[in-house]
Image (cartoon, rainbow, N blue to C red):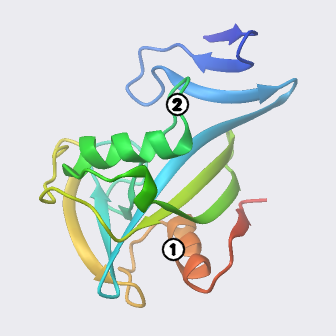
Amino acid sequence: MFQNNAQNNILEIVSNSKNHSGLSIMCKKNNCNIPASYLILHQNEHILLLKRFNTGYEDGNYSLVAGHVEPKESFSQCIIREAFEEAGLTIQNKDLKVFHIMHRKTPTFERVETFFIATKYSGEIVNLEPHKCSDLSWFKVDQLPMNTIDYIQQAIQLGFKGVNYSEHGW
């Protein structure tokens, strides 16, 4: 079921589904976009990837620490929260840099995704969501696993080439 919050121009999916409960969607008339943030944690030519597990979406494939932007939350606030919730990392806003923006179309929704890069963090990397993530490992930027999600691979490759924006699925 959809609820329209006209004051914030946000459409929220209200559902019992674990995949869509409380999902924030930016809407303008007939055009809705799901906002999400991703973290490229970069150390010594390696990046941190996680293997999705038991989520119902791209399970068994590698992605990044990421999440949907919650209502009244900025893209940077989202990735700071997600880094802590998923990997036990504390990242300061000043240490985040916008790496890549992607406008992505799926069969169901359009998505606006912000990829941040960070080289500084505190805390020990720990898989805090083993029920949704079966691996959290470092990979060389130029040797990503074959089972890296295609749009994730696209954003990483283009971002490291200095390309700030791309589209996927159009």
Which residue carries the number 1 mark? Answer: 153
Give amino acid for label 1. Answer: Gln
Q: Residue at x 46, y 40 (%)?
A: 77
The quarter of the picture where the N terminus appears is top right
Q: Residue at x 34, y 53 (%)?
A: 59
Secondary element type, mark 2: loop
Give amino acid for label 2. Answer: Glu
Which residue carries the number 2 mark? Answer: 73
Residue 43 horizontal/vertical position (percent): 30, 79
Q: Is residue 142 above or below residue 79?
A: below
What number is the disc on residue 101? Answer: none
Q: Residue at x 58, y 76 (%)?
A: 159
Disc tally is 2
Q: Is residue 123 left or right of residue 18?
A: left
Residue 145 horizontal/vertical position (percent): 35, 79
Residue 61 horizontal/vertical position (percent): 36, 63
